[in-house]
Amino acid sequence: MHHVMSQPRSIAMIGAGLAGLSCAQALTAQGHHVQIFEKSRGVGGRMSTRSFEDWACDHGAQYFTATDPAFKLQVERWQSVGAAALWDAKMTSFDAEGWQTIKPSVGRFVGTPSMTSPGKQLAKDLTIHFSTTIDQLLREGGGWTLHSKEHGLNASRFDTVLLAIPSKQAEVLVQPHSQVLYQYCQDAVMLPNWTLMVYAKAPLPLDFDAAFINQGMYSWLARSSSKPMRPQAEAWVAQATSEWSSAHEHLTKDEAAPLLVDGFEALTGYRPELFQNHLWRFARLAQPNDTGPQFDPTLQLGLCGDWTTGQKVEGAWLSGQELARILFIHA
């Protein structure tokens, strides 16, 4: 059966991370009118790079892999426009036995010149309202209006509202409208991640670019400056375990800093003098979830995001594509 698209719809997408951008791009290609609302000042969500003086540090997603054929094509498109490249990292792991070199089994990609580049490439033809935190969805007469913390009631009316934000942020918005979607969000518990960015004046004498850490407070350590097209100034990122981060989630940045610094010194023998830290409140799922994006055709309300399809950057992108496919079926 040949599926002819019905009337183009006006769609509000909340969140300009990779899932939201992927979905908005696919829906735009179907002929819909999409407006994206994003609480921060830029796109990419947890695909982000912090710049400081001569340094740059990827402090969110560290790299991505590509196994799905459609996502492989997307990565090739990013590579062809210079928005992504292979990271040929020397990998190790660390446990009770000490440091051990790992032979990478898969290609690891990064955004170039920064982790935000793939998102920016997806966003270039999309309509995005930045610094707009949607705090209420209002349903009236078969349509939707949006209320934001910064600007109050938005003048536009939408046929459909889609959320591509962490489950904890989505649940507040869907609760007044859908018990099913609210429960789905509630079930997807996301854990925090404390991250330390270290800026060194000279290269650290460590014989690797990245390490999976299997004991202590950290789970990942990487020389961010070893990635393609990054500033040469020595920058490292260390990400704490979910357990440690959860136990210390209540700390302020200043309170967490000395603990993160001590841990870094214990692990590497180097005591950072120049550093920043960041708490990602919703970094990863407590339990794996691959049930996929959700959509209520009666309400015209849907959810996507890495937390609906497994944890990875690839999962985020695929969840956006999948939600666009679901909408196409219900068109």
Image: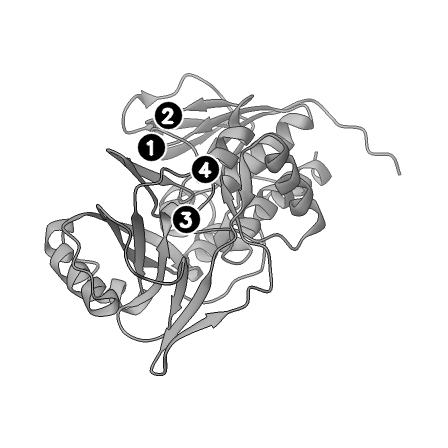
Mark 1 vs mark 3, foreground winner is 3
Which residue does the image show at 28% across and 29% down from the upper left? 149
Distance between the alpha carbons at the discs numbered 4 and 3: 9 Å
Identify the mark nearer the N-term, 1 or 4: 1
| Cα gap from disc 1 to disc 3, whole angstroms | 28 Å
Q: Tell me the amino acid under the disc marked 4.
A: Met
Label annotation for residue 229: 4
Residue named by callout 3 = 226
Q: In the depicted view, which residue is nearer to us: 119 or 86?
A: 86
Q: Nearer the viewer, residue 80 or 136?
A: 80
Q: Are marks 1 and 2 in contact (CB under 8 Å)?
A: yes
Query: Of callouts 2 and 4, which one flags the residue occurring earlier in the amino acid sequence?
Result: 2
250 vs 295, left or right, is: left
Up the image or down, 126 lies above or below 135; here it is above
For residue 152, side relative to residue 275 (left or right): right
Circles 2, 4 touching at the beta carbon (< 8 Å): no
**In the rendered view, would you say 142 is above or below 316?**
above
Crowding at label 2, few (<14), some or many (≥20) Cα neighbours within 10 Å? Answer: some
Residue at (30%, 52%) from the top-left corner?
236
Q: CA distance from mark 2 to mark 3?
A: 31 Å
Vertical position of residue 35 compared to residue 213: above or below: above
Closer to the camera in the image, 68 or 62: 62
Q: Amino acid at mark 3?
A: Ser
Kindly report the distance in space between the C-alpha atoms of the residues bearing marks 1 and 4: 25 Å
Which residue is farthest bottom? 97
Q: Label 1: which residue?
A: 40
